[in-house]
Image (tube, rainbow, N blue to C red):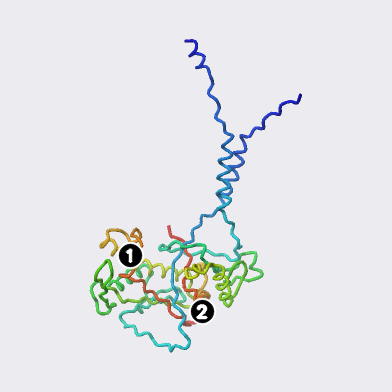
Amino acid sequence: MSKKTPAINSSSTADIAFLLLCYFLMTTTMGTQMGLSRRLPPIPDQNQKVEDQKVNQRNIIIVKVNSSDRIFAGNEPIDVSFLKDKIKEFVSNPSDNPSLPEKEMKEIEGLGQYPVSKGVISLQNDRGTSYKAYIAVQNELVKAINELRDELSMSRFGKKFASLDEDTQDIVKKAIPQNISEAEPKNVGKK
Amino acid sequence: MSKFKQEDKKEVPAITSSSLSDIVFMLLFFFMVTTQLRETENKVMVKIPQASESVKLERKDLAAHINIGTPIRSLQAQFGTDARIQLNDSFKTVQDIGNYIAAERDSKSEADRPFMTVNIKADQDVRMGIITEVKQELRKCSALKIMYSSRKAE
């Protein structure tokens, strides 16, 4: 007669599995990539004559970041913390100031007549500008546009822009477009 | 009456924990399957800048990554400390971006190609000169949808 083999105690397999589980939990990166989304302008056609886009002087604001990370907005030095308000004022032009961009009445589906600003923000940088300063400026520009969109969404739809559904977001985007142009690189102030 | 007394004395049977390991194994397999190990090794040090308006990258599977930064310490003897561009897992020059984008584009399905995003992961201390060159190169191969990788500021 063979002896009955004693059952192997399996209560610790759970612990082993837990250890493995913890390892995978720790090493898994649920990393969501975040960033600022941009669209580059297409390269101009070689055959096509480069004609200067006639943009009315009042409709453009030039934001420059120089090699020592100083910011100039419309030819005057400005701190990065004031840039947002300056851009907001530029785009919205609340008092119809003749030196700020003109607006064009546009029929937008779902919103009716809305004065759409023709303002364009032109961002220029130097080769020596640090990436950090560049992103900080980009961020302020996006923030200005986002705040304006939020304000419009709150007054018209009673919700923040981010919590609107996609169609409504498109309407708001049409009313307040994000016109940021990244200029052709220029070699200014070589190091 | 004695009947009841006998039942009171009965011990509560121990809960079998043998199936616990099965449950944990199931969880384990789930994580093992969903974990994707990073296929490219970072050869540049990248500390991405902060930006409060960061948005999530849509369609992560359709992104092509360009890393820009100084080489990691162990490679500095070989490659120096100047900012370099890393594509896939080797150092490349700006001129190679065109081929890289073409290869990335080919690897995506036809319907998804217009939605391909180029994710520029650059160190916050690199100079804009190299990034402008990269941007110009991307424009040349008409990969216009780009994203500046950034951290959400707390």
Q: Secondary structure at mark 1?
A: helix
Chain label for disc 2: B
Residue B39 location, x and y as percent? 60, 61
Chain label for disc 1: A
Find disc 1 in the rendering and name its residue. A147
| Left or right placement of residue A2 versus residue B29 in this view | right
Q: Nearer the viewer, residue A95 or A52?
A: A52
Badge 1 crowding class, 10 Å Cα cut-off, few under 14, some 14 to 19, many 20 or more, is: some
Residue at position x 74%, y 25% in the image: A3
Q: Amino acid at mark 2?
A: Lys
Single out the mark in the foreground, 1 or 2.
2
In the displayed orientation, state which residue is furthest to the top. Answer: B1
Q: Nearer the viewer, residue B131 or A37?
A: A37
Find disc 2 in the rendering and name its residue. B140
Q: Amino acid at mark 1?
A: Glu
Tag 1–tag 2 contact (CB < 8 Å): no
Q: Is residue A41 above or below residue B15?
A: below
Name the image quarter holding the C terminus of chain B. Answer: bottom left
Q: Nearer the viewer, residue B142 or A89?
A: B142
Residue A29 location, x and y as percent? 53, 55
Residue B6 location, x and y as percent? 52, 14
Badge 2 crowding class, 10 Å Cα cut-off, few under 14, some 14 to 19, many 20 or more, is: some
In the displayed orientation, state which residue is furthest to the right. Answer: A1
Do the residues marked 1 and 2 share a common chain? no
C-alpha distance separating marks 1 and 2:
33 Å
Q: Is residue A122 above or below residue B59?
A: below
Residue B71 figure quarter: bottom right
Q: Secondary structure at mark 2?
A: helix
Residue A47 location, x and y as percent? 47, 88
Residue A58 figure quarter: bottom left
Q: Which mark is residue A106?
A: none
